[in-house]
Image: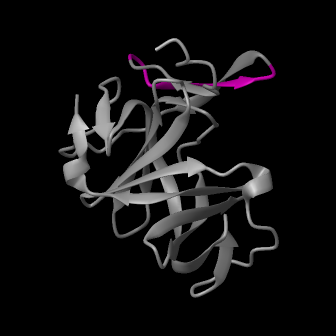
């Protein structure tokens, strides 16, 4: 995959688990990648998967704890090097792409039941929780730190679309996507 490292900003060494982050064209050591809790999965780093007709290559895996459990988020690249997040939580799959800053809602005040319009569609906050990054491995478009916590808000539209708003010290981000039927996730 020729575009694989074009947008990588963080890489976790497979051998030693050391994390490196690209900053201003130079790498800095960022600590350990933590220990990933293994569970049966259709997704594996470096093994292409067909997701609802799209060919994706998982290149990064982050695991997040939310107190009652944990979930995995895989950073995936398509055939053209475009990235997306494929999340797996208790057998449920979600495919989301990052929203560009100019596409993100302005002045959003997150709380349960709050509504916001994204790309002409109304979304409602259905979950609000704190997540802690417990492990990382592979490559990511951003720096993730084991032990770092952030607030996240899951939103749902009437048509079944989903969005996520995340907030942490020094930043925030939006993703938008949809739930994926597990039968539409086919290892290649």
* Residue at the limit of the structure toward the bottom, as seen here: 113
Residue at position x 21%, y 46% in the image: 39
Q: Which of the 4 image quadrants contains residue 118?
A: bottom right
Residue numbers of the magenta segment = 15-24
- Residue 2: x %, y % from top left: 52, 11
Residue 170 is at least partly visible in this image = no
Label count reads 0
Judging depth in this view, the residue of 181 and 38 nearest the camera is: 181
The image shows residue 50, relative to residue 23, as above or below, that is: below
Residue at position x 24%, y 58% in the image: 91
Tell me: 72 left or right of 132: left
Q: Quadrant of the C terminus?
A: top left
Residue at position x 77%, y 16% in the image: 25
The image shows residue 11, relative to residue 53, as above or below, that is: above
Colour mode of the rendering: one colour
The image shows residue 52, relative to residue 45, as above or below, that is: below
* Residue at the limit of the structure toward the top, as seen here: 2
Residue 178 is at least partly visible in this image = yes
- Residue 46: x %, y % from top left: 34, 23
- Residue 146: x %, y % from top left: 53, 44
Q: Is residue 20 magenta?
A: yes
The image shows residue 176, relative to residue 36, as above or below, that is: below
Q: Which of the 4 image quadrants contains residue 71?
A: bottom left
Tell me: 96 left or right of 39: right
Q: Main secondary structure of the magenta part?
A: strand
Q: Is residue 14 magenta?
A: no
Residue at position x 33%, y 64% in the image: 69
Tell me: 144 left or right of 28: left
- Residue 99: x %, y % from top left: 66, 52
């Amino acid at each position: 995959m020729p575009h694989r490292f074009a947008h990588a900003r963080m890489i976790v060494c497979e051998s030693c688990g050391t994390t490196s982050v690209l900053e201003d064209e130079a790498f800095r050591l960022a600590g350990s990648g933590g220990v990933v809790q293994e569970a049966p999965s259709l997704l594996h780093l470096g093994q292409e998967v067909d997701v609802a007709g799209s060919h994706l290559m998982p290149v990064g895996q982050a695991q997040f704890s939310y107190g009652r459990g944990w979930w995995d988020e895989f950073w995936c690249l398509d055939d053209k090097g475009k990235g997306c997040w494929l999340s797996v939580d208790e057998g449920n799959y979600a495919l989301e792409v990052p929203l560009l800053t100019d596409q993100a809602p302005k002045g959003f005040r997150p709380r349960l039941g709050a509504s916001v319009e994204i790309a002409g569609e109304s979304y409602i906050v259905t979950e609000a929780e704190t997540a802690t990054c417990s492990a990382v491995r592979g490559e990511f478009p951003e720096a993730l730190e084991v032990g770092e916590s952030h607030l996240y808000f899951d939103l749902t539209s009437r048509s079944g679309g989903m969005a996520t708003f995340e907030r942490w010290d020094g930043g925030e981000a939006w993703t938008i996507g949809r739930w994926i039927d597990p039968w539409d996730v086919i290892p290649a």
